[in-house]
Image: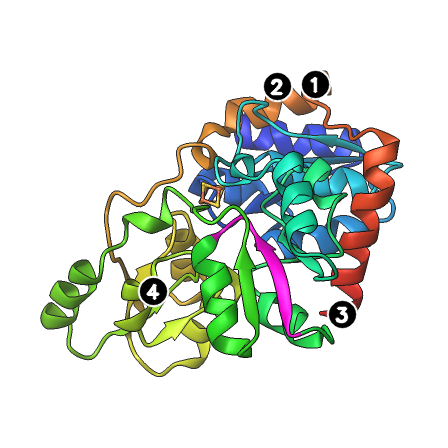
């Protein structure tokens, strides 16, 4: 029996569901029940009412959100060291200081934050719904963290004042995309459509045809008539894009755009975490209750 088959058998025996982020290794995506972005997977985790275990193959903050939203389930992260460096760029103290400096302004936090940070905010957002969430707030100014590029994107789209916290937060993988990479590829593939993530710099967004989250990119690729797409996000998404659009061609705008943390999860680690039910992600109740309010508000608004 192959390792993939053993995982599927074990999953049934333990009444588990496997969720994999779009940036996971192809072989991990292939054994998952659902592949998607953080918001799609959070919703799936809540829909799976009968499952007792959730194996969340992604990075720490996503598994934490699943634990907050599903307190009665056991949430496993295949590799405990799979941590999003961007999420670690925003501390609770920094949020508290920003709130003191900007009294009366709502705090909107990207889901790429720790549960402790989420517990400090008014509402969460993902890259797919950040514009919608900020637009839905009455106030004309918001504190927004931790990604500065996403904050600026939301400011351009909503016309509101979006104050980044910290003022330097970034995704180390998405800032690797440079406008020159796209210009060169466009020259080689003049009919290609270019889609990039809002975590890329504004300079890179400016030379693209479409800016959106990974789920929005998947939709754009399906609906757009182009047969070639230049892609500006983590390379794992290419597996899903090719699977869903077998007749289309997808080129990564920069070959080195790999998130090492996302890639820590292997089939072996998925198997051993499920077999031993280890790497359980828990969030203290005092934090979890407040983080849940911010996540619920996002799920209701979006
Ligand atoms: S791709 Fe960027 S934002 Fe996503 S987990 Fe990796 S470092 Fe974090």
- What's the CA distance linking mark 1 and mark 2? 8 Å
Q: Which residues are magenta?
A: 140-147
| First in residue order: circle 4 vs circle 2 | 4
Q: Residue 301 shows which numbered tag?
A: 3
Q: Position of residue 167 (x, y in %)?
A: 47, 49
* Image-based side of 211 in relation to 10, left or right: left
- What's the CA distance linking mark 1 and mark 3? 34 Å
Q: Tell me whether the residue at label 1 lies in contact with that at label 2, contact meaning CB atoms closer than 8 angstroms.
A: yes
The structure residue drawn at horizontal position 48% and vertical position 35%, both measured from the top left corner, is 85
| First in residue order: circle 3 vs circle 4 | 4
Q: Is mark 3 within 8 Å of ligand 1?
A: no
Q: Residue 272 shows which numbered tag?
A: 2
Q: Residue 85 shows which numbered tag?
A: none
Instruction: Out of 289 and 185, give the one closest to the viewer.
Output: 289
Q: Indicate the quadrant containing the N terminus: top left, top right, bottom left or bottom right.
A: top right
- What's the CA distance linking mark 4 and mark 2? 41 Å
* Label 4 crowd bin: few (<14), some (14–19), many (20+), radius 10 Å: some
Nearer to us: label 2 or label 3: 3
Secondary structure found at label 2 = helix
Secondary structure found at label 1 = loop
| First in residue order: circle 1 vs circle 2 | 2
Q: Is mark 2 within 8 Å of ligand 1?
A: no
Q: How is the image coloured?
A: rainbow
| First in residue order: circle 4 vs circle 1 | 4
- Outermost residue toward the top in this view: 276
Nearer to us: label 4 or label 1: 4
| First in residue order: circle 2 vs circle 3 | 2
Secondary structure found at label 4 = helix
Q: Is residue 146 magenta?
A: yes
**Residue designated by label 4:** 202
Instruction: Out of 116 and 16, give the one closest to the viewer.
Output: 116
């Amino acid at each position: 029996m192959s390792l993939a088959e053993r995982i599927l058998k074990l999953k049934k025996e333990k009444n588990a569901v496997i969720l994999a982020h779009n940036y996971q290794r192809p072989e991990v995506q292939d054994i998952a029940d659902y592949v998607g972005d953080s918001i799609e997977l959070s919703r799936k985790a809540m829909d799976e009412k009968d499952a007792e275990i959730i194996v969340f193959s992604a990075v720490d903050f996503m598994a934490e959100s699943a634990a907050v939203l599903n307190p009665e389930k056991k949430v496993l992260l295949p590799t405990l060291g799979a941590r999003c460096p961007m999420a670690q760029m925003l501390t609770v103290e920094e949020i508290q200081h920003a709130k003191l400096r900007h009294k009366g302004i709502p705090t909107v936090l990207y889901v790429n934050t720790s549960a402790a940070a989420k517990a400090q905010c008014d509402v969460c957002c993902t890259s797919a719904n950040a514009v919608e969430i900020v637009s839905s707030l009455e106030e004309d100014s918001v504190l927004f963290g931790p990604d500065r590029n996403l904050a600026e994107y939301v400011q351009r789209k909503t016309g509101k004042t979006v104050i980044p916290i910290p003022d330097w937060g970034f995704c180390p993988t998405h800032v690797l995309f440079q406008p020159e990479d796209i210009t060169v590829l466009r020259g080689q593939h003049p009919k290609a459509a270019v889609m990039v993530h809002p975590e890329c710099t504004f300079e890179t967004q400016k030379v693209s045809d479409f800016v959106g989250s990974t789920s929005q990119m998947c939709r754009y690729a399906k609906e757009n008539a182009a047969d070639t797409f230049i892609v500006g996000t983590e390379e794992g998404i290419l597996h899903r894009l090719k699977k869903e659009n077998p007749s289309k061609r997808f080129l990564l705008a920069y070959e080195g755009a790999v998130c090492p943390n996302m890639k820590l999860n292997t089939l072996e680690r998925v198997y051993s975490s499920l077999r031993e039910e280890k790497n359980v992600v828990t969030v203290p109740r005092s934090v979890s209750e407040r983080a849940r309010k911010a996540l619920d508000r996002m799920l209701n608004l979006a």
